[in-house]
Image (cartoon, rainbow, N blue to C red):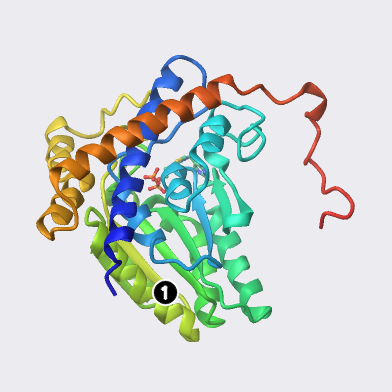
Amino acid sequence: MRPNADRLILMYRNMVLIRKFEERSAGFYREGKIGGFLHLYIGEEAVGVGAIAALAPQDYIVTHYRDHGHAIARGLDPKALMAELLGRSTGVAGGKGGSMHLVDVSKGFWGGYGIVGGHIALATGLALASQYQDENRVTLCIFGDGSTNIGYFHESLNLASLWKLPVLYLCENNLYGMGTAVERASAVASMAEKACAYNIPAVRIDGMDTLKVFDATQRAIEHVRSGNGPYFIEAMCYRFPGHSMGDPERYRVKDEVDRYKQRDPIVAFGKQLEGDGVVDEADLERIEREVAQEMDAVASFADASPAPAPESMYDFIYAQSGTH
Ligand SMILES: Cc1ncc(C[n+]2csc(CCOP(=O)(O)OP(=O)(O)O)c2C)c(N)n1
């Protein structure tokens, strides 16, 4: 079922919010206010927004380090997300996780993870727990094409299929793992085919088209929620910037990047909504303006927030008694 007009507008707004959040975080990185790595989601917004819009509130998400867009699409507070990137105490992980470890369990967002492929086992384990406890819950596990070459991927898909676990695997195939083209790293050209090896139904879709992602995810979720076991979606997409900030991008030519930019998923979705009479040009401009204003408030909040107190340095390293 297609989302109603209000939801479509919210999805579009979320895509704009992700884009502007990423542009602002790149600015903070260049100013030296964000440490470590910063992996941007620019260009891939249709995947995260389209897929996450099809989830129910009780569902879980486990994702990789390119997680800002997924967190925003799930409705985590952008102020607390930006504060986390800056390592401030008001961040979603108290400023101790940073860009790759965004989390909010109250929203079923179990986090971004930096170990390529490692989180696929965590997501599969969460799905096992949901099945064991007879919860009506699907776990959405998001990862890149590079993750499908990792052992955790194969062990997890095998068990998920064998035990019919309620997990939806979503591969964001952006054609590169860092500076390596997918065909130089994977013996199998289509990541979806790898799922077939484990008897998991799989589709390969256009990940630059928000509603195609939404439709495919909705169908997949229905399959999983009905107790049929896992499902696999390979969303073909493209990241416009480098792998992370500071990537010299010697592995791809400018023409290729420009060609994908012509297919900007935000512009395409805006045009689609206009064509369907859901919005007009003035609405799109207003959304752009409002989000830009919101981003000013997000950036000021994060930048004015304090660093974690030195005495909190050892908090949450070990489970505190009574919390688990
Ligand atoms: C186990 C492990 N090996 C290597 C790395 C270094 N590394 C970080 S990102 C990355 C590429 C992963 O590419 P992909 O899964 O396609 O995701 P994308 O960055 O394209 O979204 C690699 C190899 C790592 N973080 N973890």
Question: Identity of the amino acid at label 1?
Answer: Ile
**Does mark 1 have its CB less than 8 Å from ligand 1?**
no
Residue 284, quarter of picture? top left
Q: Position of residue 52 (x, y in %)?
A: 41, 59
Badge 1 local density, few (<14 within 10 Å), some, or many (20+)? many
User: Tag 1, which secondary structure?
Assistant: helix
Viewer-nearest residue: 69 or 20? 20
Q: Position of residue 57 (x, y in %)?
A: 52, 65
Q: Position of residue 162 (x, y in %)?
A: 53, 82
Q: Is residue 195 above or below residue 318?
A: below
The answer to whether residue 176 is seen in the rendering is yes
Residue placed farthest to the bottom in the image? 227
- Give the residue at x 63% y 55%: 106
Viewer-nearest residue: 238 or 161? 238
The answer to whether residue 199 is seen in the rendering is no
47 with respect to 100 (left or right): left
Q: Position of residue 233 (x, y in %)?
A: 34, 66
Q: Is residue 31 above or below residue 1?
A: above
- Give the residue at x 17% y 55%: 273
207 with respect to 69 (left or right): left
Residue placed farthest to the right in the image? 321
67 with respect to 123 (left or right): left
The residue beneath circle 1 is: 221
Quadrant location of the N terminus in the rendered image: bottom left
Viewer-nearest residue: 25 or 186? 25
Residue 277, quarter of picture? bottom left
- Give the residue at x 52% y 35%: 79
Number of marks drawn: 1
Q: Is residue 76 above or below residue 242?
A: below
